[in-house]
Amino acid sequence: MSKNVSSLPIFVRLAGRPVLVVGAGPVATRRIERLLDSGAAVTVIAPSVGEAVRAWADSNRLRLIERAFEAADVDGIALVFACTDEPAINSAVATAAHEAGSLVQRADDAGASDFLVPAVVRRGVLQIAISSDGQAPTLARILRSRLDAWLPRAYGDLAGLAADFRDVVKQKLPRHHRARFWSRVLDGPIAEKVFTGRLAQAREELDQLLGEDSPAVPTRGEAYLVGAGPGDPDLLTSRALRLMQRADVVLFDSLIPAAIVELANPKAERIHVGKRASRHTLPQEDINALMVRLAGEGKRVLRLKGGDPFVFGRGGEEIAQLADAGIPFQVVPGITAASGCAAYAGIPLTHRDHAQSVTFVTGHLKEGELELPWPQLARIGQTVVFFMAVKSLPVICEALREHGLAEDWPAALVIEGTTVRQRLVVGTLADLPARVARETIEGPALLIVGEVVRLNETLGWFRPDR
Ligand code: SAH
């Protein structure tokens, strides 16, 4: 059902212009604050006022008239805000304003207002205004909070950077090159520097670029090594999501659920680089080289890794090559399967009474062998998390017992943790291998060993019923 709108979104410059606010309650105070920000010359009329308004008046930031509204108050004023909680007074203000040819907004009645005050998300000089044409103000506010939570704070800095360099760019670049220049700067490696807190470096780079005789548009080739979390798409970080939506190419392996890959920019090329227990689709060296090549072509290459890229993810190797090739890159942490599975299985990894430390180890067999520091792992008072441990599970349980842990020491396997297919097999070092042997395991699984496993009985909460 589409409805026509009755308003035009515009941003009005108010610096130095007289505006009138009638009322001084909470709604009026919010309006006044925004009006003062815009530099308007604010007059407030109200018989009694709260502390905030009083303080502004005392510091001469606005003119305060402490009495009831009179029709003549609107004379010579372009914008009038009727913000009392008395509809009759607001209505009188509106009538007077209309007779004087002013535009009026009524806080209690959008339909009777000449203009609407939108919900606003602000980042420095950037303002995103949301309006429902007065029809669904709560929806506009909900949207406002969503956007506010999602929009990186650094957009304010980015806008500030653009403002500071605007004049120089105008002098340096012919008109027809400017837009292209800016879109490369504001949507490329320089912007990413700002987003990752390197504002001074971003400035320096821009300075350098503009110091050249004919500033070449910077190439935007760069790489992002991004942790996709353990499986539940909701566990992506907002930076991961933002970069996924900016990428030109996404490289992902079998651990990444389709539901996550789908969140990438629909125009991005998607390359499945495989890797599922020994069935390699692309050898690691080729993946590294591919990333370097694609970024070198000026593309924004995003490498999605399951969990956290720096936890058994060979993330270090992938970026070492990028660093060698001088390609800008960033690493975005993800929720490792260890924390994701622990949280969704109700197994705290540490606990004051049961585990004072937690160790992450790989259970990946090398030529059928598992070389691990067993005496350290087979101690009480700690939790040990084994990644890639389905095949080696019997070996692990036996080795831990041989090195001193009791046969009834708790152990659990979390299969496809955090997804709607999550399964939890709880047992002991003695019986877990047999219990697991009865399961068909197709997805990834994580072994957690330690007393904390027992807490699952009371703390387990995620039991998908699909
Ligand atoms: N970088 C990843 C680990 C990669 S190694 C991270 O931080 O999580 C791959 C191993 O991670 C799998 O063999 C399995 O042990 C574990 N894993 C990853 N996702 C998992 C999931 N959803 N459920 C259980 N284990 C998972």
Image: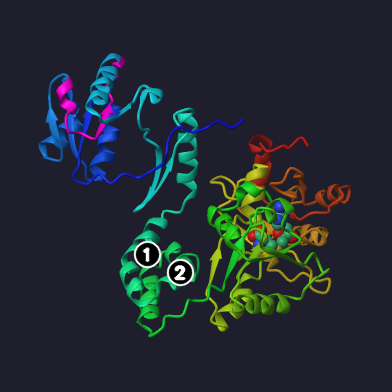
Position of the N terminus, as image quadrant, is: top right
The picture quadrant for ligand 1 comes to bottom right
Pointers 2 and 1 in contact (C-beta within 8 Å):
yes
Q: Which mark is residue 162?
A: 1
Please state the extent of the stretch shown in magenta in the rendering. 71-87
Q: Is residue 380 visible?
A: no
Label 2 lies in ligand 1 vicinity (Cβ under 8 Å): no
Name the quadrant containing residue 76.
Answer: top left
Position of the C terminus, as image quadrant, is: top right
- Would residue 109 appear left or right of 245 to someone viewing this image? left
Q: Residue 133 in the image: state x and y as whole percent.
A: 45, 32
Determine the residue positioned at 71% across, 79% down. 285
Residue that badge 2 annotates:
185
Q: Residue 287 in the image: state x and y as whole percent.
A: 70, 75
Between 343 and 92, the one nearer to me in the picture: 92
Between 125 and 336, the one nearer to me in the picture: 125
Determine the residue positioned at 63% across, 74% down. 318
